[in-house]
Image: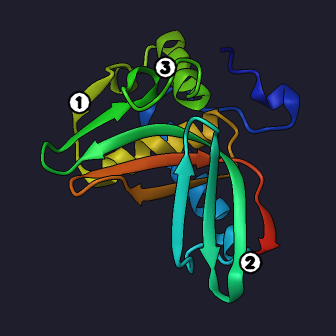
Amino acid sequence: MTNDAGAQGRPVIPANYADLVTMARAHVDALTYGHAAWGFGRTESWAVDLDAGTIEWTLPDNVIARAPVQLIGTWASDLGSYRWAWDHPAASPGSAPAAQAVREFATTNGIAELQPVEFECSRESARDFASVAVLIGDLHGLYVGQASRTALAYLGFGGVSLSRAD
C-alpha cells in the first residue's frame, strides 16, 4: 500500500506512529460524532455476523441500523493483549481487509508498533490500533462490542442504512 492518499483527495497518512495515532483518534472521534445523528451510542442491542460481514444495531422505536462490518482486532482484558484480525481465529481469510491494510502500511513504512500479530497493551492503546485501521481502511466508523466476558471486539463498519422492524 502506498501513501498516495493526498492524490485521491484524502489527507496524507503519516508514516510515523505518533502522528498516525493522533490523526486516527481525531478521525474516529469525528466519525463517531457524525453517527450520533442516526442514534449510534443509544442502541439497545447489537449483533454481528462476521461470515456475512454485517452488523445490526437495534435502536429505540424499533429502528434497525445495518452496515457492512469487518473485524479489526480483539482485546483480552484478562491478558491485557490485543490481536489483529489479519491472523485471528475469529476472522476467516480475506475477511479483515482494514487490518491487513494496516499490516501492509506498517511493513512498508517500518512502523514496528503495528507489526506484531499479538502484543500486550492497554484498552486505550487497543482502541488506538483499531482507529488506525479505520483510517487506513477508509471505513465509516468503529464499534467496540463485548465479545465475551473478557474480550472486546473492535469492529470497523461501512455505510449505515436504517429501517423499521416489523
| Earlier sequence position, callout 3 versus callout 1 | 3
**Secondary structure beneath disc 1?**
strand
Q: Residue at x 71, y 66 (%)?
A: 65
Left or right: residue 128 versus residue 28 is left
Q: Mark 3 or mark 2: name the one nearer the start of the chain.
A: 2
**Where is residue 13 drawn, in percent x and y?**
64, 32
Where residue 89 sits in the image (x, y, percent)?
Answer: 36, 26
The residue carrying mark 3 is: 103
Q: Residue under circle 1?
A: 119
Secondary structure under badge 2? helix
Viewed as shown, does residue 70 lie left or right of 76? right
The x and y percentages for residue 152 are 34, 52
Q: CA distance from mark 2 to mark 1?
A: 35 Å
Q: Is residue 118 above or below residue 41?
A: above
Residue type for callout 1: Phe
Q: Which mark is residue 4?
A: none
Mark 3 → mark 2, Cα distance in angstroms = 32 Å
**For the point 64% across and 71% down, which residue is it?**
33
Which residue is at the front of the view, 87 or 15? Answer: 87
Going by the numbered disc 2, the residue's amino acid type is: Ala
**Image quarter for residue 94?**
top right
Residue 119 is situated, as x and y percent measured from the top left of the image, at 23, 30
Between disc 2 and disc 1, whose residue precedes? 2
Q: How far apart are labels 3 and 1 at the CA level?
A: 14 Å
Q: Say which mark, if any, is on residue 37.
A: 2
